Amino acid sequence: MSPGVSNPLVTGLSCLVCGTEHEATLSAQLCMACEGSSDHRDPGILDVQYRYEDVELDRGRLARDPGVGLRRFAPVLPTALDAESLPAGGTPLVPAPRLAAALGADAVWLKDETRNPTRCLKDRATAIAMALAGTSAQRHVYCASAGNAAISLAGFSAHMGFNAHVFVPRYASRTRLDWLTRYGADVHVSGGDYDQAFDESVVVGMREGWFSRNCAVNPYLVEGKKTVAYEIAEQLRWTAPDVVITPVGDGCTLGAIGKGFRECELLELTSGRPLLVGVQAAAVPPIVERSGSRWQRAGAAKTDAASIAVRRPRNAVRVMREVAATNGYFVSVDDEEIGTAQADLAAKAGMVCEFTSAATFAAARRLARENLLQGRVVVLVITGGRIDEPQAPPAS
Ligand SMILES: *Cc1c(COP(=O)(O)O)cnc(C)c1O
Ligand SMILES: [Zn+2]
């Protein structure tokens, strides 16, 4: 196989910022036309384009497909997935009747992404990265991460015999570092936050010529994440839910989910799409602020929602566009609300999830207080299941 994008229906890459079209090569990253331009604050993120009229994906075909996880959606993915890859995706949609009653909603469903191979939705993007890297001779892969993307990359690399180089912030928890060590990753702990770790990863990764699993920059990875939307629609018997709530850091995850639901409608798998709600922590709410949302909580000094504590979101344009297209909104919640939500998800729905993912239920509570969820079918995307132990204070 020639290295790179193997789906013949991929027609190219389109810049989300300036619209320039690019060839869908394996090494494509940010838009060159945008690079160095001082007109805009956003990097030129590229979006994969398909010849949708030739995509063969219908309800019957999917119902008969015995494949596992992401592989079922191959016609709308950039590359074929190896049957021997760790099985990302194919996670359950769990009903939560007691949460529905608490919110006055018609139904609440939890998309349980904690059931992915490394306990997190990130595995859907990693599966694509590994498939693409696997078509080249490159056996070194890298990413920056608050923890989950790094652990995901480390796990898949361990499985395939690749070298994973991961860049994590200074405050990465012991729990997360331990997972990385178990998987045998090469761990670079930054002196700064996630944003600094990101910059450091790009410098070293580019210098060494490693394959990038930085989701915002590698245009192909969000394609893996969009399969969450297809699965939710299928699990609801091809009806779109009314509202889908997801935590937002860089914006790749919810942006991808928006694209997935748009494609479901375009391919006539569903009629209609859900209203999208993105959640951020009150301490780090750049996208909530930028969207001018009225759902802003007053600022807090810090947050334990480490997986979404991103000060310079790289995929803001994508996620803001997808959310606006559904008349949705961005909401910020503080750590007290998230803590209560995390406890309730366990005690009233049997769902143990990481702090960041509980922000979805905290946001649902706020919307419910204004009767916005009355009679609605609501999906909370439970993005991850890694519980961080409380951190010991750093030794001075
Ligand atoms: C990465 C992550 C998110 C947010 O995804 P973005 O693509 O950065 O917006 C949410 N929850 C968990 C558990 C994550 O690891
Ligand atoms: Zn551009």
Image (cartoon, grey):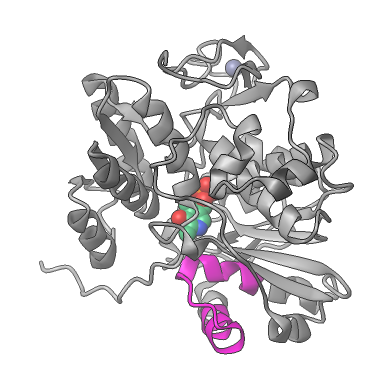
| Magenta stretch bounds | 340-363
* 287 part of magenta stretch: no
Is 343 covered by the magenta stretch? yes
Q: Quadrant of the C terminus?
A: bottom left
From the image, which quarter does the N terminus lie in?
Answer: top left
Q: Residue at x 64, y 36 (%)?
A: 318
Q: Position of residue 142 (x, y in %)?
A: 30, 35
Residue 9 in view, yes or no = yes
Residue drawn at 49 percent across, 21 percent down: 30
What's the magenta bit mostly, secondary-structure-wise? helix
* Image coordinates for residue 350, horizontal then vertical, percent: 55, 83
Q: Is residue 73 left or right of residue 250?
A: right
**Viewer-side residue, 113 vs 383:** 113
User: Residue, x 68% and y 79% (percent of image)?
Assistant: 96
* In the displayed structure image, the side of residue 64 where residue 306 appears, left or right: left
> Where is residue 36 drawn, in percent x and y?
47, 15
Between residues 101 and 41, which one lies in front from this camera angle? Answer: 101
Going 62% across and 51% down the picture, which residue do you hit? 228
Q: Quadrant of ligand 2?
A: top right
Q: Is any part of residue 308 visible from this angle?
A: no
Q: Using the image, determine if residue 237 lies above or below residue 136.
A: below
Q: Is residue 341 positioned above or below 153 on the image?
A: below
82 lies left or right of 233: left
Q: Nearer the viewer, residue 87 or 182?
A: 87
Query: Where is residue 231 drawn, in percent x and y?
Result: 67, 53
